[in-house]
């Protein structure tokens, strides 16, 4: 039963608890009432820390940005290591939190935490010698790769968990072999292979070492 004691609360605590709830119940399962119950306070008390449900989602997104463990200590010329490390860190957050993909896809980038991540990522491309516009294009390209791959990965995992493949109506055995091979491919291997292609594409497009 909520006690009404708010001494332990802050915007960050509220956001962290909301993120935990979405990890278990998804975004649709997040409500101010459930969040208040989880924190031991009345739902109305939460409005001391967030202005609305929409503001709560922004706070949760900030938590997600803060979890992206960027390789900030690399030298300026270690561009490939920086890109690989940054994309792996982003991918890890997307996989660890089921609601992350929807939040990153739908929420506006505007908070200091979000802008810090975006600027670090953009700056790594600029340090490679790319022009400002090329740096923006490269940044958007690599982010799209991670989000697109994760969307497919999450969907594939859902299919694998819920359905057994049935290709009984497929006449061509080569098609069946291909589908079974695709299902058997480990997601980690697929991500690493895609990352290799991303790096190769950047090298070819921008003549990088």
Image: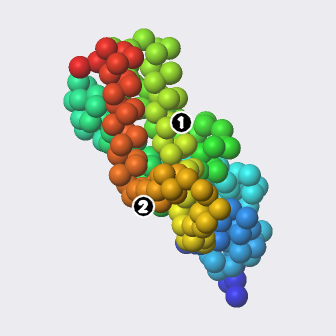
Image x and y of residue 188, in percent? 37, 54
Q: Is residue 24 visible?
A: yes
The earlier-in-sequence mark between 1 and 2 is 1
Image x and y of residue 108, in percent? 66, 38
Q: Is residue 70 visible?
A: no
Question: Quadrant location of the N terminus?
Answer: bottom right
Residue to which mark 1 is pinned: 144
Q: Residues within 10 Å of mark 1 (few under 14, many from 20)?
A: few
Residue 175 falls left or right of residue 192 = right
Residue to which mark 2 is pinned: 184
Q: Tell me: residue 67, above or below residue 121.
A: below
Local secondary structure at mark 2: helix
In front: label 1 or label 2: 2
Return the residue nearer the eye: 2 or 80: 80
Image x and y of residue 117, in percent? 46, 38
Residue 92 falls left or right of residue 105 = left
Q: Tell me: residue 73, above or below residue 3.
A: above
Q: CA distance from mark 1 to mark 2?
A: 24 Å
Q: Residues within 10 Å of mark 2 (few under 14, many from 20)?
A: few
Which residue is depicted at the point 49% across and 38% down?
145
Image x and y of residue 200, in percent? 33, 28
Which residue is depicted at the point 55% across and 53% down?
172
């Amino acid at each position: 039963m909520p006690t009404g004691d708010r001494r332990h609360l802050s915007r960050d605590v509220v956001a962290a608890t909301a993120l935990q709830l979405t990890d278990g119940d998804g975004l649709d399962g997040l409500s101010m009432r459930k969040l208040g119950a989880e924190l031991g306070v009345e739902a109305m008390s939460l409005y001391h820390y967030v202005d609305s449900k929409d503001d709560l989602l922004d706070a949760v997104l900030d938590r997600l940005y803060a979890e992206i463990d960027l390789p900030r200590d690399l030298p300026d010329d270690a561009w490939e290591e920086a890109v690989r490390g940054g994309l792996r860190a982003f991918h890890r957050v997307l996989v660890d939190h089921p609601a992350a993909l929807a939040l990153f896809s739908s929420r506006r980038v505007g908070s200091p935490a979000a802008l810090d991540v975006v600027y670090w990522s953009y700056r790594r491309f600029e340090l490679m010698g790319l022009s400002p516009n090329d740096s923006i294009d490269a940044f958007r390209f690599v982010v799209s790769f991670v989000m697109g791959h994760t969307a497919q990965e999450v969907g594939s995992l859902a299919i694998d968990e819920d359905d057994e493949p049935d290709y009984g109506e497929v006449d061509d055995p080569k098609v069946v072999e291909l589908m079974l091979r695709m299902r058997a491919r480990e997601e980690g291997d697929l991500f690493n292979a895609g990352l290799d292609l991303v790096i190769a594409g950047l090298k070819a497009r921008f003549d990088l070492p």
